Amino acid sequence: MPELLAIRTLLDSVPGGPFPDFVADFAHAPGTRVVFGAGSVQRTGVFARSMGSSRALVVTDRGIADAGHLDRVLASLGAAGVEWSAFMGVVENPTTGTVEECVAAARTYQADLLIGLGGGSSMDTAKGCNFILTNGGKISDYHGTGKATKPMLPLIAIPTTAGTGSECQSYALISDALTHAKMACGDKKAAARIAILDPDLTLSQPARVTRVTGIDALAHALESAVCKKRTDISIAYSRAAFALLSHYYLTALAEPANETARAGMLLGAALAGTAIENSMLGAAHSAANPLTAHFGIVHGEAVGLMLPHVMRHNMTNPAAWEEYSTLAAPLGLTGEALPGWLSGILQQAGLPASLPAGLITPENLPVLAQEAAGQWTAQFNPAPVDAAAFEKLYQSSHHRSA
Ligand SMILES: [Zn+2]
């Protein structure tokens, strides 16, 4: 078919090939317009206006305001004649309660546009708010995919960290305020209409945030690249993301004011987010969630320390091994060397490469493994992972600390 030939030609022109000899069936509909460039945040008002907005609610937190980012957005809205109000109540790992407060603010203000400004939590809160504001009910009604039946308000996403890639995804991650269980609520209508990627906004990220969100983004590229739901298009995004993130991560840490490194990280994180939107994640994310829930280990840290072990486990899958080899080639490495390379990166970044000694006990190991095996992402890992496999993964991550 001519369409397939055209896609074949397009894919072959992407560096990092060779790609498989065939293009499997897929549907690809990018729902988010990405605007990239230093100073692009100044265009927020014009974009808001072009979407017919006259009353925008900016969803953010005090830290983002203190860094001066909120003022830049508000100045741009004002210059375009768009009225605004700001919801400052975003917290890390937003809960159903956070979302309800945001809904109340949006209702009172009668907002006709939402702007998520900040890290993944700001964008998750804005998306979660949008579900309830436009479709009613409560967050748990939207747990899963495609549960919103009515149109939703337009959303502009403006990330100030290079990490989650939430700006290019249609999912909101909201925790139940009582049980702390994380609900992934997805709907194509919830995706941002426009993602504004302005590297200048990421210059203010504290080193700790750059460190953990950057590793999370790298993990998004590496897990989406080999997951069972990958397509030829998502692979292209994963590879481009990995190339940028692997090249710029340590530089962004060592030279926080290096604009090229910050730009590379921001774009890499957004491309990795797009890869997830068009595929899925894998076992490192499944194994990380129980570590965050039980021990409060930060998401990026937990994902980072589990990933080399998951990658070694995945080598048993020929397609995953082949993809790791492709990703590793520009680094001058073999696929087998990629987990070791990642451990080295963790070490150089000052992140833990293993779980603290004594954390995993014979009592909690089966509980953690069972919970990991029950995570949504586990079923998409290229090499099968059950509770027994997760016990081994936790143990291997643990033993290395000795
Ligand atoms: Zn992640």
Image (tube, rainbow, N blue to C red):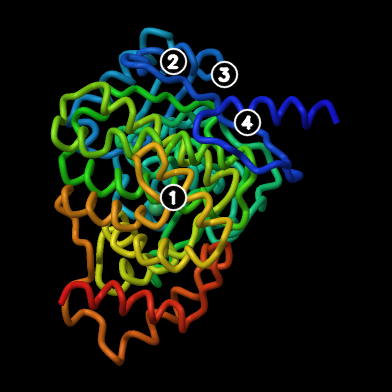
Disc on the earlier residue, 2 or 1: 2
Q: Position of residue 45 (x, y in %)?
A: 42, 14
> Which residue is identified by label 2?
82
Dot 3: element: loop
Q: From the Cβ of disc 3, is ligand 1 less than 8 Å away? A: no
Residue at 48% across, 44% down = 326
Q: Which mark is residue 11?
A: 4
Query: How many angstroms separate mark 3 from mark 4 (CA)?
Result: 33 Å
Q: Nearer the viewer, residue 184 or 351?
A: 351
Disc on the earlier residue, 2 or 4: 4
Quarter location, residue 180: bottom left
Query: How many angstroms separate mark 2 from mark 4 (CA)?
Result: 41 Å
Residue at 50% across, 28% down = 113
Q: Position of residue 85 (x, y in %)?
A: 36, 28
Q: Outermost residue toward the bottom?
A: 363
Graded by Cα atoms within 10 Å as few (under 14), some (14 to 19) or many (20 or more), the crowding at tag 4 reads many
- Position of 224 relative to 366 (above/below): above
**Circles 4, 1 touching at the beta carbon (< 8 Å):** no
> Which residue is identified by label 1?
222
Query: How many angstroms separate mark 2 from mark 1 (CA)?
Result: 40 Å
